[in-house]
Image (cartoon, rainbow, N blue to C red):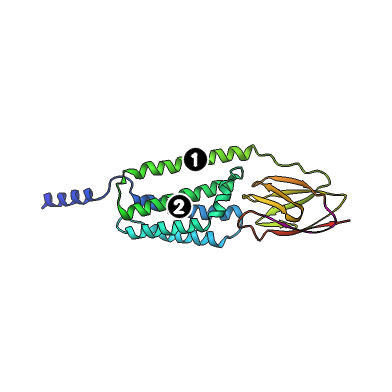
Amino acid sequence: MATATRGSVAEHAADRPAGPTWMAMARAGAIVMVIFAIALQATARTIIPPVAVIGAVFLAFIPFLKNERRWVGLAAAVFAVTAYAGNFPIILDDLQNPESAPSFILQLLSTVGAFLVTVGGVAAFFGPPARWVRPLALAAAGVFIAGTVGSVALAVNTDSATRLPDDVQVTAQQLMWAPDDVVINTGNSGIWIENKDGIRHTFTIPELDIDVEIPALKAQRVDIDAPPGSYLIICTVPGHESMTGTLTITS
């Protein structure tokens, strides 16, 4: 009887996959996506409903990403691809601007998380050899570490403009301009724009052909040479359409 029991235990252990599995990769990716969703909203210092939903869905997936539930892995992969594709313009914009380190690093983290969930979930469903799990996971981690180091180095070496004594200050914070009604006169033509967000912005006045890039946590200044009147201020970064204001030039 004891021999049979030991044999059954040995057979059961042999049935379990050795080392990390595809489903473990998918679960790790879901955890990364939850961390990304929390960190992005903490960085922006505001609730971003689509990101909050993405984080909540991946949090719900985590307990069910087990080897015996391969269809859950496939469902998580489909959701990861859908969420990533739906936010791709914003993700791509942040990844193209590594000097804005906080947003670049977070979007790189979301890319790694989506990769792990998608590859792990699809592979868990279709069942290719698990020997590729560790190399792919290590490669994804390596890309994230290298990208993070490079982004931080660029951010440290990106200068901020110095505010001149007569400059009018405008602050970009929590996806808003403060003040959103900027008043200058023709003899006071400098505007100093400080970005207090962990994401990049642009200070754009289409009518005056002004389009100034403001990296995360940096400042820039612009000289205004225009006739009296009112001009629309916007931010052209995808997803920042609510950032509007007015520049009023008095005589």
Residue located beneath label 1 in the image: 145
Residue 80 drawn at (x, y percent): 45, 56
Residue that extends furthest to the left in the rendered view of this protein: 1
| Magenta stretch: includes residue 232 | yes
Residue drawn at x 43%, y 61% as measured from the top left: 60
Q: Amino acid at mark 1?
A: Ile
Residue 131 against residue 232 in the figure, above or below: above
Residue drawn at x 64%, y 37% as measured from the top left: 157
Q: Earlier in the sequence, mark 2 or mark 1?
A: 2
Question: What are the residue bounds of the magenta stretch?
Answer: 226-235
Q: Amino acid at mark 2?
A: Ala
Residue located beneath label 2 in the image: 114
Dot 2 crowding, Cα within 10 Å, few <14, some 14–19, many 20+: many
| Magenta stretch: includes residue 195 | no
Is 82 placed left or right of 190 in the picture? left
Residue 34 against residue 162 in the figure, above or below: below
Residue 211 against residue 54 in the figure, above or below: above
**Magenta portion: prevailing SS class:** strand
Residue 162 drawn at (x, y percent): 76, 41
Tell me the quarter of the picture where residue 140 sits: top left
SS assignment at label 1: helix
Q: CA distance from mark 2 to mark 1?
A: 16 Å
Q: Nearer the viewer, residue 184 or 10?
A: 184
